[in-house]
Amino acid sequence: MHSLHALDQKFAILDELPESLYALVITHSHGELYQRAAGVMQWRESLLAGELPCAQQLSWPEEHICLTILKRLEALDIVQYCHQQEELTDSVVESILDGVSSAEEFSRKIAGVDSFDDKQAQRQNIRDRDSAFEDHDGLSDHLDSSSAASN
Amino acid sequence: MKQRLGKLRDYLLHDLIERDTAVRLALLSALAGEHLLLIGEPGTAKSILARRLHLVFREGDYFERLLTRFTVPEELFGPLSIKALENDRYERLTKCYLPGANIAFIDEVFKANSVILNALLTILNEREFDNGDQRIKLPLIAVIGASNELPDNPELDALYDRFLCRYKVSPVSEKAFPQLLALSDSAQRPVPENERLSMQEVRQIQQQAQSVTLPQDVMLLLQTLRLYLQQKSLYISDRRWRKIIKLMQVSAVTNERTSISIWDCWLLQHCLWDEPGHRKLISEWYQSHMGIGSGFNHERLEKLVHTWETTLQKEASSTTQSRNAAGEPLYEDSDGRPTTLKDKSKVATRDGEPLYLAPPDEDDRSNKGTGYTRDELLVSFFDDIYQQCHINGKWKHINAYINKSANRLSHHHQNTPIMEAARYAEVFINARSRETQAIFDDINLLKGKLQQQQLSLEQTIAEHLWIPAAFSEKAARSLSRAIEAASSLSNRMELVTAGYSKLQRE
């Protein structure tokens, strides 16, 4: 049972959202509001630190979408530029929110197919780079699943 | 007993201005067997309070001493017994001194020097005194310590920690100053003998308090508060937490309850601070926890609801172009009829006569949109004899020129798109309804909690012996306002949810 204080604390996460992302996060359709807000703040914090967040620790979005976005961001190699750059970071987070909406819509359209393959991420010209993300299904052709898993 | 304690409290309060909390803390801590520290300027009724507190009890002596850096143990613990010394015993005559008192007032307590500090600590903590080779049990109920300032010597930390309740006494406010000036010097009302408390009754209260339970909500509050204090780098000893529970148990039992209430936790602010500024911090945290003061963040939820209201308004008033059965976008032509054509060209005429463009080498072929009739073309651009004009290196007759449709002046009509309210996918509407309903439910949950809090306030705090009426009234007002605000937000969010269910479906 929630105490009044616990309930207040639950709402308090909304205060942390930057103004530019507030309405987008509030009215986003993926996931539960407070989990979403906390997740977005995790993304933002990591990006501002110039790092990709750890997929296992992210509370939002769902894992399969999350991994796809992480692979895409890794491929774009944009994260290093986000370091302490609030405006750029918020713009990237905004794109992540859009990306999650698209992925969710796509998943809905192909209901019954339980995986979401990001062909665009696969097409990135990143053959020479290692990825930190495991790719058990071999979806991303630039990854060596066995070596990635051992990292 | 509650009624009697209320009378005793009011006796202590008589003619004391703005000492409500200090008096309540003094009596409660005495009943709980804890000591109270009063921090404040001289002449702020600290010693009067201690003297009155002593009169609340039937038996026992009162002891009062002002400490200085040069105070010797004899002044506090009694002189050495010459008789005992003659018999090779090192003993003090403790009667009429601190070891013989049940209520003691020690002014400037932090001036205690190391010679008396250890014995004082034992007295405060164990209620025992080493007299010669014997450790004797003391009748001490409580000590009220007073000081102008907080201890700045680490040696005094242990002594400071012995005072569970701490209260900063300020001079009377400007508002109450006339009341202070108008006080009469009439003798203090005596406490009727039958109202006074015996030691046995005090022990009985403490015994009953042991069976007072600690409910889950209080447990949660204390756990959360401990984490909060840790975040603020405020360390509270385990012993202090235990003593606080004991104090709240006494608060509960004296208020004729069998379990601690979250309202008893009001006392925490007077038990957990090391510096007076911390008290405000703890008090604000507590009020926030209880949904009073800043506890109900109306602005936060207002912003959330407003965001959804704006989004709904935008989505409900959003329009999209109408389409025919084949899915082609529809426009309205110049006659107001629907068409799939985006625009329409209409041949221009003047008084029924068709209009033409000037030959291509002219800068303004349309003649500022008015065109040329056949005769105007002839006069302006064609020769009179052969009715020809040199166009693109060739002679062209006027009849051939006007027969070419490209040379006709035509007016383009841009058809207006036919708009209709945007239609949304069922899945979109369902997602929106779910999201807004969840917020509506949360606000209602909050409203329910606030109402529960209000009920609990009415039941628990109204006649609470140890919580000043000013706090109860403030809490009641604050909760009423919070409930009102939550109701309004709940109604607005309900309208948003209903608004989404009315969106046009695809």
Image: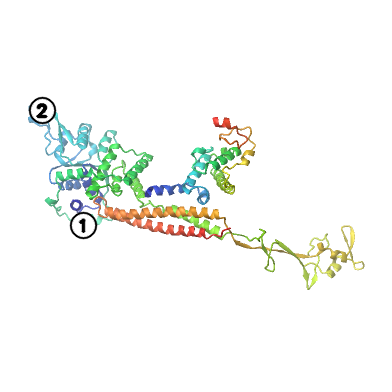
The disc numbered 1 marks a residue on which chain?
B
Left or right: B28 in relation to B369: left
Of residues B423 and B30, the one nearer the viewer is B423
The residue at which mark 2 appears reads as B89
Task: Bin the neighbour count of mark 1 within 10 Å (Cα to Cα): few under 14, some 14-19, many 20 and up.
Answer: few
On the image, the x and y values in percent for residue A2 come to 38, 48
Left or right: A107 in relation to B295: right
Residues marked 2 and 1, same chain = yes
Residue type marked 2: Arg
Q: Earlier in the sequence, mark 2 or mark 1?
A: 2
Q: How is the image coloured?
A: rainbow
Residue B252 shows in the view: yes
Q: CA distance from mark 2 to mark 1?
A: 55 Å
Q: Which mark is residue A39?
A: none
Please identify the residue farthest to the bottom as the structure is shown: B351
The quarter in which the C terminus of chain B is drawn is: bottom right
Task: Bin the neighbour count of mark 2 within 10 Å (Cα to Cα): few under 14, some 14-19, many 20 and up.
Answer: some
On the image, the x and y values in percent for residue B395 come to 90, 61
On the image, the x and y values in percent for residue A137 come to 58, 36
The residue at which mark 1 appears reads as B182
Q: Secondary structure at mark 1?
A: loop
Of residues B235 and B150, the one nearer the viewer is B235
Residue type marked 1: Ala
